[in-house]
Image (cartoon, grey):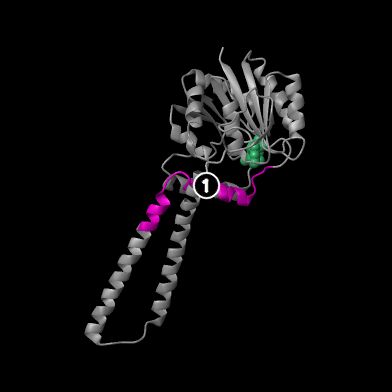
Amino acid sequence: MLKISLVVPCFNESEVIEAFHAELIDVLEPMGADFEICYVDDGSIDDTLVRLKSLAATDPRTRYTSFSRNFGKESAMLAGLRMSQADAVILMDADLQHPPKLIPQMLELHRHGYDQVVAQRDRTGEGMLRTALSQAYYRLVRRFMDVEVVDGAGDFRLLSRRAVNALLALPESNRFSKGLFSWIGFDTVSFTYENVQRAAGQSKWGGRRLLNYGIDGLLSFNSRPLRMAIHGGLWLFLSALAYALWIVANVIVDGVDTPGYATLVAVIVGMSGVQIATLGIIGEYVGRIYHESKQRPHYVVRETNEAELPLSVPMV
Ligand code: UDP
Ligand code: MG
């Protein structure tokens, strides 16, 4: 029988963590599965960690690592993947929005030879505005990104050991998992399930956080925005050239003429806008290079029940 690791990032989930754990056990035990649960407390300020510790005290299959502050879900997932030891690893949220009852189906597909099994949610019960915005975003991403990212295919997925190893081998500090999952390749299959609302507590994704996440996604996977800036600049240059030639021709035919301030101002303002936007794009990439070049660890561990710290660098 295959061993399974469940990787669960938790940030302020004290209201639901015990219910989640109970439901997970209720699914896994009847299957006769050999499993471990790797919880990562992402610097919660409620008593998530206390509850994780008491779960670990009563259940030896429970492992946990707690961060010194909130480092974000991407870092928490990375720590969990580093903790996992099994041949099949399942990433899931702690708020029961990723229903544990789908696990048998995921394992079944994995047995058919798939390295990545994605449980893709539909958008039942979600606000209309958020649905519309996400769909527009994914259309944009599909156009501008080199890797494929699918709407609703979140982080609820099973990964084979070799897929996990491939992910862990990627060194970047700016991690955008949706892109990384697609970048590593391997045979991937997905199925859709009906979206469920979180059992208790609050979503940590407000509008601003989502927008920044979206920008990260677009920029962290390719340099196409830079290419677009070059194309835009070239087109503008060519139109300016054509316009200048037209003026010269006009002067030759009609003699010298003074008006044209309005055109001049419009052109200057338009060009400045393009230049500033382009600088902004370049700035984003430079910022990313700066960030990567510091080579900081993705997180700092406060405490853990692991024998070895799940770290790439020693704890300070
Ligand atoms: N999460 C985390 N760190 C964060 C934000 C979220 O570990 O900074 C965890 C959270 O505890 C949950 C999962 O990531 O298990 C998904 O978060 P949430 O339910 O808030 O996102 P949503 O489902 O609304 O997209
Ligand atoms: Mg959620």
Q: Name the residue: 50% across, 44% down.
A: 292
The span picked out in magenta is 203-230
Up the image or down, 240 lies above or below 36; here it is: below
Q: Residue at x 46, y 64 (%)?
A: 276
Give the amino acid type for the residue marked by disc 1 in the picture. His
Label 1 Cα crowd, 10 Å radius (few <14 / some 14-19 / many 20+) = some
Position of 138 relative to 161 (above/below): below
**Left or right placement of residue 258 versus residue 100 in this view:** left
**What residue is disc 1 on?**
291
Majority secondary structure of magenta residues: helix
> Can you tell me which quadrant of the image ligand 1 is in?
top right
Front residue of this view, candidates 311 and 75? 311
Residue 26's x, y, as percent?
Answer: 70, 20
Residue 147 in which image quadrant: top left
Pick whichever, 241 or 312, lies toward us: 312
Percent x, y of residue 37 = 65, 24
Question: What percent of the width, then of the height, locates residue 100?
Answer: 64, 26
Q: Is residue 172 at least partly visible in the picture?
A: yes
Image quadrant holding the C terminus, namely: top right
Where is residue 313 shown, x and y percent of the image?
Answer: 57, 33
The question of residue 227 being in magenta is answered with: yes
Choose between 134 and 263: the one closer to the eye: 263
